[in-house]
Structures are given as structure tokens and as C-alpha cells.
Image (cartoon, grey):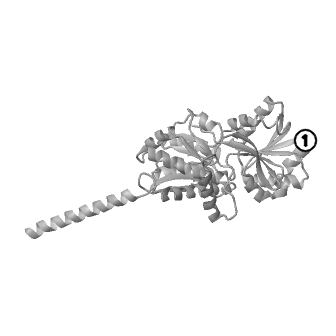
């Protein structure tokens, strides 16, 4: 009888130890957030830059003790910059991985497609790159954006395109998706308002590689300048083919396509003189963020020696820090608590001050640079 009682105590003790061990393991388990980025496909160069920023930020947060005493990690799914693929990725993160929050989905069309999914499942989505106005105009309470907004970009450019840069008769070449169409529409409005004119818009698919027919039509038109809204790869190819055709008109690249990466693709000669709308410039961080920016560049150099991190790296980096800050202020890893904390965000990142308005939009600091002697130089600071 004594032996049986002792055995029961031993089993109970062992069960208690196992339960304690499981609880301890759960206490140390990382906080896992989700991310959807184009890891493959025609815009993967941009998505992989966001991922690089996400990884650098995760290392920073975890080196500082993590969040709520736990390390933080990210499950990153390939949305390919495509609406269907991105919706599938978001559903997988919510249903399979049970993530409490998601960063994504890079492309505006992909983000717009994913928004009803996060609303239905009540999981906050932090938008790091998509610029279509409809994203925040819909006032989806589960969606927050801290990158730009095409209409706001247009308003900021209003003082410069015609009055300062002399873009009077514009030919517009844009990618045929929500981003390209909404940006072309915004710029057309500001050109009309300031005495210029968009003569016509040429739309191309995201996978297009031969822009010569479109450029030839632009060359033979009355246009004195050209505006581009498309991916890094496409801008690089357009500038190369532009120079090969002997075209000399002014070029303006919207939506913060990184000048440094375009120069890598097109070459210094083909990029010379082009203007770029910036949301982050590695050599000009916000005041007070110089040391943190230096450390980001240092971390980026470990993977890409001699290369400067671009906007996509900076937005991926800031996205993690904004999310980590919200989780910390929420006090627990629950989607509704994180959503509520995001609404009260007041965070200075490398892309500027983040405070969400009533539509859950926060505009980053922006500037205009020009490639001079093979290097981008800021010529106008629009919003600090």
C-alpha cells in the first residue's frame, strides 16, 4: 500500500515537472508575426530587400531582450506581388500559423486583396510599401499604413514638377496595376492644376522587358519630359533603352524607387540626370536617427558589402520595430490588443515619424534627388 502511494506521488511529481517544463518552454517560445512579400517573380528584388530589413530589425530587437521578455521572429510567405498568391499567403499565416499580426503585402493590388481577409479574421495588417489611396480610404480598422499615399505624394510634388523642374508636357509610363494607375491619375491632376499636362499614359505589365515600342512613341510625341511609375527592374531597363534610343528629355521616377539600385541596373550614364522621389535616403536619415541608421548600413553591408540599403530595407526594418513597439505597449500577444496599440503609435523610425491618422495612414518624410555624376543628390526636402 505504501509502495502504491509512493508511486502515485512519484507519477504526480513527474507529471507536475512535465507540466512545469512545458509551461517554461511556452514562456520562452518566440512571438511569431507574419509577413507577406514577393520572394520570387518580377518584383522579388524589392520584396527581398524588405525581408533583409525585417531580419536586421529582428536581430536588433532580440539583442535588446526581445518583446515582453520573449524573442520575436517572423514567418515570411511568398506573395509574389500577386493578389491571389498574397491572399493565399495571408490565409496560411492566419489559419496555420495563428499569427497575431502581419506585415505586407508589398504591391497595392495584393494588399487590397488581402484586406478583407484580415478584417474578417480580425488580425492587424501593417502596410510597409503599398501606396494606392484606396488602402486607407476604405477605413479598414485592421489595416495601418506608414508608407506613402499616391494622392499625398502628388500634393507634395505639386510645388516642384512644373514650377521647379520644368515638366510641362509629360508622357507617363506606368505599370498596369492599382499602384501604377492610381499614381498616374494623381500626377495627371497635379499637372492640370499647375499648368502642365500629361499628354498620354503608356501602361506595361510588371513582367515587360521590351519598352522600345512605348519609348519610340514617346520620343515621336510632343512630350518634353517623362514620368515613370514601375518596379526597380523596369525603371532600370527603361532608362537603358531610353538612352539607347538617344532620348534626352527629363525623367522623373515616382514612388521612392531607390536611385542606387536603378543605377546598379541601368548604369551611371543611363541614370544620369534622372530625378527620384525618395522616402528614405541612406545618407540623409531623420535628425536623431544618425547612429541607428549607421548601424543599419553596417548590418546591411554584412550581406551586401559596399551597397547602401534602400527604401525597401528601411521600411521592412521600421515595420518590425513599429510592430514590436505596439506589442510591448499592448502588454500581451493578442490581435485586438495589438490593433488598439497600433492606433496610438508615436514612433520615430528611419523613414520618419509614425503617427496614424483617422484613416490609419502615416506619411513618411520625403525628398527629391537627382543623379549627378553617377550619384543621387537631394535637391529638395519636401517633408521632414
4 to 69, vertically: above or below: below
The residue positioned 20% from the left and 62% from the top of the image is: 12
The residue positioned 24% from the left and 61% from the top of the image is: 16
Q: Residue furthest bottom?
A: 3
Secondary structure type for disc 1: loop
| Quadrant containing the N terminus in the rendered view | bottom left
Instruction: Give the class, few, some or many, for how many residues have Cα within 10 Å of label 1's Cα (few <14, many ≥20).
Output: some
Front residue of this view, candidates 103 and 38: 103
Residue 59 in the image: state x and y as whole percent. 53, 59
Front residue of this view, candidates 342 and 36: 342
- Find residue 223 and report its image quarter: top right
Horizontal side of residue 334 vs 345, given as left or right: left
Q: Residue furthest left?
A: 1
The residue positioned 85% from the left and 45% from the top of the image is: 250
> How many labels sit on residues?
1
The residue positioned 91% from the left and 52% from the top of the image is: 246
Front residue of this view, candidates 75 and 290: 290
Residue 300 in the image: state x and y as whole percent. 63, 60
Residue 381 in the image: state x and y as whole percent. 72, 41
Give the residue at mark 1: 221
| Quadrant containing the C terminus in the rendered view | top right
Please say whether residue 231 is visible from this viewpoint: yes
Horizontal side of residue 29 vs 147, given as left or right: left
Residue 270 in the image: state x and y as whole percent. 84, 55
Please say whether residue 37 is visible from this viewpoint: no
Amino acid at each position: 500500500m505504501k509502495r502504491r502511494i509512493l508511486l502515485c506521488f512519484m507519477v504526480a511529481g513527474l507529471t507536475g515537472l512535465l507540466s512545469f517544463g512545458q509551461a517554461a518552454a511556452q514562456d520562452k517560445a518566440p512571438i511569431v508575426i507574419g509577413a507577406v512579400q514577393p520572394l520570387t517573380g518580377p518584383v522579388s528584388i524589392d520584396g527581398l530587400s524588405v525581408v533583409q530589413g525585417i531580419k536586421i530589425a529582428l536581430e536588433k530587437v532580440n539583442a535588446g531582450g526581445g518583446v515582453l521578455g520573449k524573442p520575436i521572429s517572423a514567418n515570411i510567405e511568398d506573395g509574389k506581388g500577386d493578389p491571389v498568391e498574397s491572399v493565399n499567403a495571408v490565409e496560411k499565416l492566419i489559419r496555420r500559423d495563428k499569427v497575431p499580426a502581419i506585415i505586407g503585402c508589398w504591391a497595392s493590388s495584393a494588399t487590397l486583396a488581402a484586406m478583407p481577409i484580415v478584417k474578417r479574421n480580425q488580425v492587424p495588417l501593417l502596410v510597409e510599401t503599398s501606396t494606392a489611396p484606396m488602402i486607407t480610404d476604405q477605413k479598414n480598422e485592421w489595416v495601418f499604413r506608414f508608407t506613402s499615399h499616391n494622392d499625398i505624394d502628388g500634393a507634395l510634388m505639386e510645388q516642384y514638377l512644373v514650377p521647379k523642374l520644368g515638366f510641362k508636357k509629360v508622357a507617363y509610363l506606368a505599370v498596369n496595376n492599382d499602384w501604377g494607375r492610381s499614381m498616374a491619375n494623381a500626377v495627371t491632376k497635379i499637372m492640370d492644376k499647375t499648368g502642365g499636362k500629361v499628354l498620354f499614359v503608356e501602361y506595361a505589365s510588371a513582367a515587360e522587358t521590351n519598352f522600345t515600342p512605348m519609348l519610340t512613341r514617346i520620343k515621336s510625341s510632343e512630350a518634353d519630359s517623362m514620368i515613370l511609375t514601375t518596379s526597380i527592374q523596369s525603371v532600370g531597363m527603361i532608362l537603358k533603352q531610353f538612352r539607347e534610343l538617344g532620348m534626352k528629355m527629363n525623367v522623373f521616377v515616382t514612388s521612392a524607387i531607390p536611385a542606387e539600385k536603378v543605377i546598379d541596373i541601368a548604369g551611371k550614364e543611363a541614370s544620369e540626370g534622372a530625378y527620384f522621389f525618395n522616402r528614405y535616403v541612406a545618407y540623409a536619415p531623420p535628425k536623431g536617427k544618425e547612429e541607428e541608421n549607421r548601424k543599419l548600413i553596417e548590418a546591411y553591408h554584412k550581406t551586401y558589402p559596399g551597397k547602401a540599403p534602400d527604401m525597401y530595407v528601411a521600411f521592412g526594418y521600421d515595420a518590425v520595430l513599429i510592430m514590436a513597439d505596439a506589442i510591448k505597449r499592448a502588454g500581451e500577444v493578442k490581435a485586438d490588443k495589438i490593433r488598439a496599440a497600433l492606433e496610438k503609435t508615436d514612433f520615430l523610425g528611419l523613414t520618419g515619424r509614425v503617427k496614424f491618422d483617422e484613416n490609419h495612414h502615416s506619411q513618411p518624410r520625403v525628398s527629391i534627388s537627382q543623379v549627378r555624376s553617377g550619384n543621387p543628390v537631394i535637391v529638395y526636402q519636401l517633408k521632414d
